[in-house]
Image (cartoon, rainbow, N blue to C red):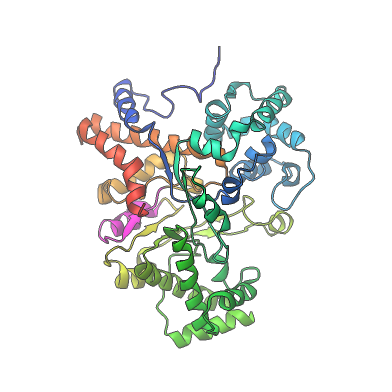
Amino acid sequence: MSTSIAAHPDRLLPADPGTRGIARNLLKQVEDLPIVSPHGHVDARIIADNIPFPDPTELLISPDHYVTRLLHANGVNLSDLNVGKSNGADPREAWRIFCRNWHLYDGTASGYWLRSEFVNVFGIDDSKINETNADEIYDQLQKIVEQPDFRPRELFEKFKLEVMATTDDPLDDLSAHEQIAADSSFSGRVLPTFRPDAYVKFHGAGFADKAQKLIDIAGDGRTGYEGYIRAMENRRTYFIDRGAVSADHGTLNANTLKLDPAEAARLFEKGLRGDATVEEANAFEAHMTYQFARMSVEDGLVMTIHPGVYRNHSPETFDKFGADTGHDIPFAMEYTRGLQPLLGDFGNREDFHFVLFTIDETVHSREIAPLAGFYPSVYVGAPWWFIDEPDAMFRWRSAITGTAGFSRSSGFIDDTRAFCSIPARHDASRRTEASFLAKYVAEHRISEDRAAEIIVDLVDAAPRRVFKL
């Protein structure tokens, strides 16, 4: 008999039998709804060309920094997992390392998603995963990924994905998105997302070359700061014409500044020369956050920000393996004062949608929920990254509901590169929402009929509403 916990119908539901019964009823309202994923990092090219997944390691381990970072913390060399710029490691041996350390994922969000993937996507009993069975499971998975019905487009349909947004460089030609949109045989929506971080941060690798290339391509003949602003506006229009509904910004913090154009131009020139101070670089980024809000008011793109991350915290790891390899670390955040210039000018503008994410749980109830509870433009971003796990999701809903209610949140954001984890992540969110609402029903704070309406709104209508879908 299987001892799989990922197959249990009551996973993540309340332990109390009475409340669990309510949660079961609420979950039934949403468990079969299509997935709307308005922010993520899956490469559109794999959908456009329906590229087969090469092997279990490349599918489930190497590209997923949620998985590899914990192995690294326990002494595994990332090169043995084919992470980032590393290559040449035997994928089967990497899989053996993973299975040898499977116990490390007990209690983690990654462990929950992986178990769910094994059982519900691959049909493999997660209770059988161990070093002894590593090769057998690898061979099972390899046979599955080689099947024609396990390619990305077929999984898109199997997962009931209706909308999936990618994250894209401002100068990406978006040809993959054009190819998908032109293919009448594919019914899903794959939308680009404008992500200009590399063209804003002075101290980022290659900033000057990237900014100048942006101006040369899209600046309409203008030069300097004026050409830079015009190029940003033009590329946003290019994205909108190809289906984009949002612009995403990984800012250092939530500070915003409305600089005089001459001062902004002076800072921009220093950034191009490479002699801007840290303070000047931060001031220009804060100014551009304000400018991107101004652009969103004008062109209608939803604006999302997710500040508060020390990127590439380990210089050694960054040099060897590159970015997005597990060592971006959160720090404390403040929103109220930093966003005042932006919200003071744009917070009440009609049709401006501004989604605030954070991985600092302390600001949910203190700042973000009160901002969303007043400004019609502001929405509370769903938990993401280090806090997109069931307990943190429940804490997040508890922190914001008393001030902002149920109407001011973004809908779930999976924020993932791991394509096969998308249904597992959304399932975890739906079960957590059912558990939270069941608690309110059991405490006679809302009726069960009303809770049933709310959960459908949270899961389905909210992301469509907030991201203008």
Residue plotted at (69% across, 36% down): 55
x and y percentages locating residue 135 in the rendered image = 73, 26
Q: How many marks?
A: 0
x and y percentages locating residue 264 in the rendered image = 48, 82
x and y percentages locating residue 15 in the rendered image = 37, 24
Q: In this view, does 398 lie above or below 124?
A: below
**Closer to the camera, 136 or 148?**
148
Residue plotted at (49% across, 23% down): 7
Tell me, yes or no, if residue 27 can be seen here.
Answer: yes
Q: Does the magenta segment cover residue 456?
A: no
Looking at the image, residue 299 sits to the left or right of residue 177; the answer is left
Q: Is residue 309 above or below residue 393?
A: below
Tell me the quadrant of the picture where the N terminus can be found: top right
Q: Which residue lies furthest to the bottom in this view?
A: 262
Q: Does the magenta segment cover residue 367?
A: yes
Residue plotted at (53% across, 56% down): 178
Looking at the image, residue 396 sits to the left or right of residue 52; the answer is left
Tell me, yes or no, if residue 107 can be seen here.
Answer: no
Q: Is residue 14 above or below residue 170?
A: above
Answer with the quarter of the image where residue 3 lies: top right
Looking at the image, residue 138 sits to the left or right of residue 284; the answer is right
The span picked out in magenta is 362-382
Q: Residue furthest front?
A: 184
Residue plotted at (57% across, 40% down): 152
Q: In this view, does 339 lie above or below 138?
A: below
x and y percentages locating residue 250 in the rendered image = 50, 61
**Closer to the camera, 258 or 156?**
156
**Closer to the camera, 450 or 333?**
450
**Closer to the camera, 220 or 16?**
220
